[in-house]
Amino acid sequence: MQSPERLLRRTLRSFAPYRRGTTVDEVRRRYGIEHPVKLSQNENPLGSSPRALAALHGISALSDYFEDDHLTLKSRLAERYGLTNEHVVLGHGSNELVQLAFTAFVDPGDEIVMALPTFSLFKKDATIFGARAIEVPLRDGVHDLEAMGRAAGERTKLVFVCDPNNPTGTRVEPAALAAFAGALPPGVLLVIDQAYREFMDAGGSEGVDILKTRPETLVLRTSSKIYGLAAARFGYGYSSPQVVAWMDSVRLPFNVARPATVAVLAAFDDDDFIARSIANNETGKAYFARELDRLGVHYYPTAANFVALAVPIGADAAYEALLERGIIVRSGDGLGLPGYLRVSIGTPDENAAFIAAFEALLAKWRA
Ligand SMILES: *Cc1c(COP(=O)(O)O)cnc(C)c1O
């Protein structure tokens, strides 16, 4: 018999499947815990924008193929950033936009430069496309932009900066990012993933200034986190018209579904929900900082809606122990951050439930 792998593309034969987090249902079944606390996927703990949910009720039909240029949505976004419609590209989540960048720009044997650890999707796509991922370790938990600049070589096509970074929550300094962008050679697309940008204060970069001086820059944003619309699958990017046109040329027709555009357009106007989400996150961040300081636990200063904190035992073991107590977090072992847990900031009750369980376990782990 032939190898069962004959069918599979060569680049995928040693492919490690994505390690997804444990689901609420699994915890219910395994431990008989009725209401697990899920702090594992950086979702909005306040749910979805109420305006977005209400707008979905206004959909009377989904029978027609729609205008696929989404001009209303694009002009809303263009206006927000002082750009034009031609600078905006839309995707089925910002994850699709990462994939479109690979599809449009990366040949087999090309290289990408990214941090270690950072969002695992970048490396996954590199594997799928037969590219080599050069992973540059963080320095003191922050992107080492100097080393990343040195790592970019002849075959580099994409350079990823995740700001704030997942899974550490750390941010890069706007001036350092601008200098880094300015020094990158032409023919390299700088991809700035800002999935958590709205949780950062006004001082962070939005990448627009960088884009204006360096057209080969792509900034990625999403409705999944701040608007609580992860299930709607909507992300957007802004770049130069040429980069946008190239990415648009390889996307599927109708890649952004009508319900997503309806929900997102309404969410953009939901100032109350946005303000409440940011306020809840600020309260939660301060609470975590206070409690982790009190417990003498190391954590990375976070600009996002999650915190990476150190555990005195293996991260997988710590994760399992919390799971048994109905608290779902992410183990750093699966995220390139061994010795740490990544904990999403929840509601005050959820945060307190995490700290109570964690404090009890910590006493045991340290004994
Ligand atoms: C959550 C997250 C996203 C969002 O992806 P969507 O496809 O828009 O849901 C993107 N990048 C990073 C780093 C994330 O953590």
Image (tube, grey):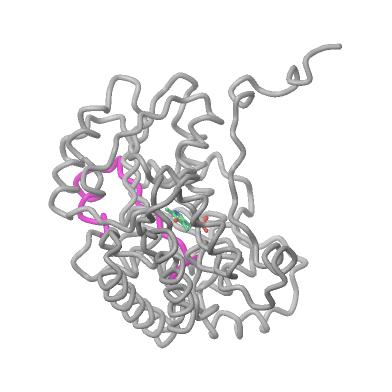
Asked whether residue 225 is drawn in magenta, I would say yes
For the residue pair 268 and 128, the one nearer the viewer reads as: 128
Of all residues, the one furthest to the top in this rendering is: 1
Occupied quadrant, residue 254 = bottom right
In the image, farthest residue toward the right: 1
| Image quarter hosting the N terminus | top right
The image shows a total of numbered marks equal to 0
244 in the magenta segment: no
**Residue 239, percent from left and from top:** 35, 49
Residue 322 rendering spot, x and y as whole percentages: 53, 64
Q: Is residue 62 above or below residue 214?
A: below
Residue 86 visible (yes or no)? no
Task: Please state the extent of the stretch shown in magenta in the rendering.
Answer: 206-226
Residue at the image position 75 percent from the left and 74 percent from the top: 61
Farthest front residue? Answer: 367
Q: Nearer the viewer, residue 248 or 30?
A: 30
Residue 311 rendering spot, x and y as whole percentages: 38, 56
In percent of width and height, residue 32 lies at: 72, 71
In the drawing, does residue 359 fall left or right of residue 64? Answer: left
The quarter of the picture where residue 21 lies is bottom right
The reply to whether residue 164 is in sight is: yes
Please tell me which residue is depicted at 26% across the width and 27% down the height of the picture: 151
Q: Vertically, is 33 above or below 331?
A: below
Nearer to the camera, 333 or 46: 333
The residue lying at 47 percent from left, 43 percent from top is 120
Q: Looking at this view, is 118 or 242 the one in front?
A: 118
Quadrant where the C terminus sits is: bottom left
